[in-house]
Amino acid sequence: MKGRRRWRWRGEHRRFAAVLVLYTLLLLLLVPYALDYGAGRGRADEEPLLRRCPSLEEALSEWGWEQRQPPLDDEEEEEEGGGGTAGAAGNGSAAAAGKRHIYLHATWRTGSSFLGELFNQHPDVFYLYEPMWHLWQALYPGDALSLQGALRDMLRALFRCDFSVLRLYAAPPGPRDPLAPAPPAAANLTTAGIFGWRTNKVICSPPLCPAAPRPRREIGLVDGAACEETCPPRALRELEAECRKYPVVVIKDVRLLELGALLPLLREPGLNLRVVQLFRDPRAVHNSRLKARQALLRESIQVLRSRHRAE
């Protein structure tokens, strides 16, 4: 009898423990749903969340970069309300009718070369492929963050079709007296010295390349080897003249790490700059960088040096 009672007591104890475990698991599963439901009811009277990209002004105010304009005086308000309206409209129409400048902002191995090639094929676009490569190579091993201001100034000059800035970084890396005259390689820089020139539709098409097999408006990839053989180097002033003919100038690069460095350019009314930011699945980016880690060695060193200095 005692053995049966003990066995029955143990069975009841096990059933009670099993029920307690199941009850605990049920609570653990239901508590998150209850919390989410309560939080959702609490937000019912609030404004719905914005599901769009913030404007430039909203982003700048969140980052603390926006500078508030001082209040206008009475005389300035009258001028603003009177003759200023027509002037503002005229400036807006002039900016819209003028050149458009687009910067493709991306990082390494995100498919930016493919996207840039789409602009390169457009017959009304003057496209430059990673011109800031010259700056990084000339100032290596400088850290990346310290070069952001120089990158911005270089972008401003290139968007205005002033390619003389490339001569500053055409010399081989190494210490050089800034007061000394530029070496012959920098003084005589041609289109053949621009990074990515062998696949540039403007450089490898008439009128800069009269012997090119295709006209500029014909869609098709440029054969780099054929361009190098048939297209002679041209002076930068000729390339600048071609740049001024195009209504749209697009520059693609991966070395501008801080979008805040572009604020002075975005606020220039005569520049009419737009930024296209490219995103890609980080898993694909990581996989692609693993395969190209040797090619990105110098860039990785510069970025890591910037991170260590920031820390």
Image: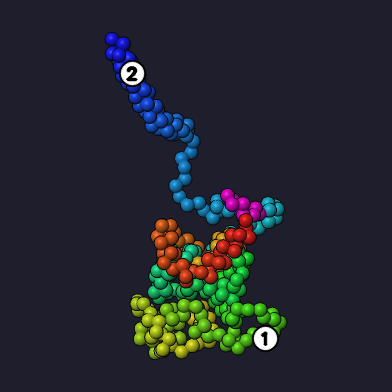
Q: Say the numbered circle drawn on residue 10.
A: 2
* Chain-order first, disc 1 or disc 2: 2
Quarter holding residue 142: bottom right
Horizontal side of 55 relative to 176 (left or right) equals left
Q: Secondary structure at mark 1?
A: loop
Quarter holding residue 7: top left
Residue plotted at (41% across, 64% down): 288
Residue type marked 2: Arg
* CA distance separating discs 1 and 2: 97 Å
Q: Say the numbered circle drawn on residue 67.
A: none
Q: Is residue 29 visible?
A: yes
Q: Position of residue 241 (x, y in %)?
A: 52, 82
Quadrant showing the N terminus: top left
Q: Which residues are magenta?
A: 61-69
The secondary structure that most of the magenta stretch takes on is loop
Q: Secondary structure at mark 2?
A: helix
